[in-house]
Image (cartoon, rainbow, N blue to C red):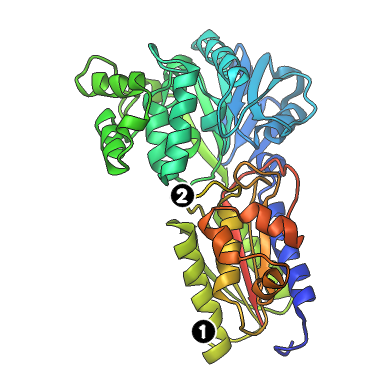
Amino acid sequence: MTRKTKNIKQLRIDAAEIFHAGLKAVDPGIAVKRYCRLDGSHLFIGDKSYDLSRFNHLFVIGAGKASAPMANSMEDLLGERIAKGIINVKYGHTAKLTRIKLVEAGHPIPDKNGEEGSRAILNLAKEAQKDDLVLCLMSGGGSALLPLPAQGLTLKDKQETIKVLLACGATIHEINAIRKHTSAVKGGQIARAVHPATLISLILSDVVGDNLDVIASGPTVPDSSSFSDCMEIFRRYSIIKKLPASVVRHIKAGISGKVSETSKKGDPAFLRTRNQIIGSNFEAIIAAKQKAEGLGYTTLVLSSMIEGETKDVAHVHGAIAREILKTDNPIPPPACILSGGETTVTITGKGLGGRSQEFSLAMAIDIAGNESIVALSAGTDGTDGPTEAAGAVADTDTFKRAVSMGLDPRQFLVNNDSYHFFDQLGDLFITGPTNTNVMDMRIILVI
């Protein structure tokens, strides 16, 4: 394929196809069946086997945007062997289940449904005895969907805290450290409740680096963070006075030893616990790369671990695209640059949007006036920020089109109003709930 055999319209089509190829690779139901199989009474998970005839009861618990299709696959696999089950999912991210109860709840701001479902999950975990097996299905979104407050705190405290953390630009690692230390279930506390039963967690990763104790705030994993870390995060972002006083008092009580720490490495609760990642952003990126190469693009994967302020990350991607046009470096056109991860948006305006839409808006400004470049950034869960869009598409004509419509792209960026910008242009990327979640994918095509 020569560099000018495709126009902007075709690049947009290609970008969408590449995104969906990556999405398909991390279908959670397929991932469960890829890692799990049943042979007689033996359940194989990865390279390990569990003789189900040796367990009295088999329970299924879990939470996350992808937990419904994961549970559906488990029901297909295990059927009536499942004695009881309950999972919390985001509203609309559902599946038809018969053995496992499904509770729809709020995300990213937790709600009463999530609290009640979390209490039921914790109670089922405590019901497990030594000769029982508990399968835990966790994915991104599990933190907000398991909002059972620690003793002395309320759901409102947690709601107000997460709003402050989302607005200040804290990373998911930092946010989840706070979540763990204000929770009755996160930070290994589900494992503590299940003990001494056998616990196996199947996990779809939505965090940079696939840190097990960060995904869904690690309810079945030893916690590496501390109350002191939480206070340092409060100070780093100067948010102590913005947080509920009860939350600050709780963290201080933990630092002084008046409140028990989360479960740490060496806790007996983890002796019979196994955590297995079954899908990640990197797997999605590699599948997207294969699709892009099949469409004739020279492809470069930057990283699946990109973090940082969204506008800054967009500027770097824009610079690489312009370099390709000017010098054929780091790869020659027709080129596809892929990246994944989870950036942050420090909110200073009063608009509406999410990190993927803001990335595409910043890219539109950065690549304006150049030759043929298309940028698609979208969340693999189908939701970007508090909107129904997964992300947005921008190209080298987006800035010019916007100005002709009386829209100032820079002002929309300052106001964090990427949603209304792309909505007026007709360039929102809408997939609906995908029932998976492995962070964001960014696709930059250059010809």
Q: Is residue 212 visible?
A: no
Give the label, 1 or 2, closer to the camera. Answer: 2
Q: Look at the image and tell me whether residue 179 can be seen.
A: yes
Q: Quadrant of residue 38?
A: top right
Residue annotated with mark 2: 348
Instruction: From the viewer's side, name the closer residue of 1 and 179.
Output: 179
Mark 2 residue type: Thr
Q: Dot 1: within a 10 Å radius of its alpha carbon, few (fewer than 14), some, or many (20 or more) residues?
A: some
Q: Residue 7's image quarter?
A: bottom right
Residue depicted at 70% across the width and 49% down the height: 389
Furthest toward the front, the residue is 406
In what quadrant of the picture does the C terminus appear? bottom right
Q: Residue furthest left?
A: 256
Label 2 Cα neighbours within 10 Å, binned few <14 / some 14-19 / many ≥20: few
The quadrant in which the N terminus is found is bottom right
Of the residues shown, which amino acid type is indicated by label 1?
Glu
Return the residue at label 1.
Answer: 323
Spatial distance from mark 1 to mark 2, Cα to Cα?
31 Å
The residue located at (50%, 52%) in the rendering is 342
Q: Position of residue 17 (x, y in %)?
A: 75, 64
